[in-house]
Image (cartoon, rainbow, N blue to C red):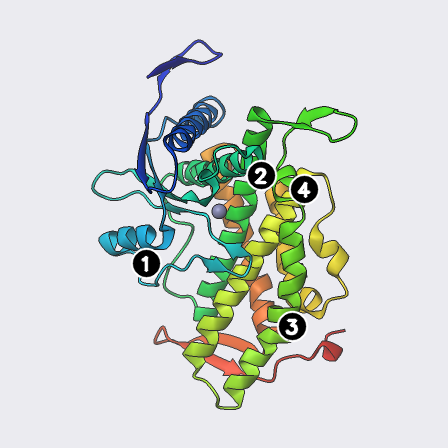
Amino acid sequence: MVDEIPNGAHHRLEVTQVEIKTSLVSDAGASRFRNACAALHQAMQLVLIDQCGLSAFPLRVILADDLTAEVQRDRDAAAEDPRPFCADRLGGTVMAKCLPPRPDDGLAVVVFDDTLWRDDTNEFALASGCARIAHEMAHCALSELRGGADRGGLSCGQTVGELAAREIVSEALEEYRADGIANALMAAIGEHVEEGDGERRRLRLHDIDGDEYSGRLLEVLNSEVYPGWRDRVQRYRDYATTFEEMFDGLSRSVWEVFVLVAHASAVARSAEQPDPLDALQDHPGVRLYLDDPWRGIRELGDEYPLLGTSAESVELEARALDSGVPAVMRTWERLGLTFRLQSSGNTHIHVAEPLFDADAS
Ligand SMILES: [Zn+2]
């Protein structure tokens, strides 16, 4: 497929490969899915070529009635991440998953849950489905900008606390950026008509997600974050669990909550609303653990263009890790956890009593 872009140069765009692995979507629904994927993939490639100086990227998408099984099958084949994939998150159920390019064909694969494509007539479901596709396209674009470099991931000379912190910071930044890009794509393809006066404006993520993420955030703060995180550490101090069990569960929970904060924040930004954490400053979980790291990540994310050059993207990610990892280490410390690298390369972990809120001021 050859397309002309405004500067007159011809660029070969990659065709989207679509696989339908569900019988719960009608032929019309499947063809809407194909069209939406092709249109958004094409738009994303043109932006990368035009604004970022990159070339087109190939993509295979799968629409599946069993997202978890499909992702797990691919993970087993690639043998890359030993952790089982789980679609249930604190922020809700995962509706799509972007898999890294396979070494054999270099093709990025995105698997979509078919739920949003089962209803043939619902316009809102169609917009939601397109927003999920736009979000996953954004992950693909960010990975193209990264140029195959990992996100400063596993290197030796780091404690297990720092490794967990790196994962938390880079994922929170990634989701915040992906939502920002998805919002721009949705604004380019959709329009919102105000009920009542019929005023038209560009579609934004907040029209689709509303206050769902920030509502969940409030629930999760109470059910999971405080006193939940400190209780996890305390149970280990009371000999009720092993360190590995405690820290695996805790870092998974912290990771999921930061990703939820990132989504809630990006959706609020799309409607020019303040960051949801601003209104939750009285919550001890926000004050003790979330506010400082998140503020740093968000400020850096806002400082850079949504889709700049590869160099800008790499610089943003490095700066986010430089300031974000120490901030998350302070969160660990408030939870009683300090990590020291030993000359053997192993981590020495000290577990003290976690802070109570009254101690925090
Ligand atoms: Zn995402």
Q: Mark 4 points at which residue?
A: 269
Q: In this view, does 308 lie to the left or right of 13?
A: right
Asked whether mark 4 lies closer than 8 Å to ligand 1, one says no
Q: Tag 4: Cα neighbours inside 10 Å, few (<14), some, or many (≥20)?
A: some
Which of 302/266 is in front?
Answer: 266
Number of the label disc, if any, that sits on residue 130? none
Q: Which of marks 1 and 3 is nearer the N terminus?
A: 1
Which of 29/111 is in front?
Answer: 29
Q: Which of marks 4 and 2 is nearer the N terminus?
A: 2
Q: Which amino acid does label 4 sit on?
A: Arg
What is the C-alpha distance between the residues marked 1 and 4?
Answer: 32 Å
Examine the rendering and report whether any part of residue 92 can be seen.
yes
Number of the label disc, if any, that sits on residue 81? 1
Question: Vertical placement of 105 versus 324: above or below?
Answer: above
What is the C-alpha distance between the residues marked 1 and 3?
Answer: 30 Å
Q: Name the residue under label 3.
A: 226
Q: What residue type is labelled 3?
A: Tyr
Q: Earlier in the sequence, mark 3 or mark 4?
A: 3
Question: Vertical placement of 71 versus 125: above or below?
Answer: below
Q: Mark 2 points at which residue?
A: 180
Question: Vertical placement of 110 versus 46: above or below?
Answer: below
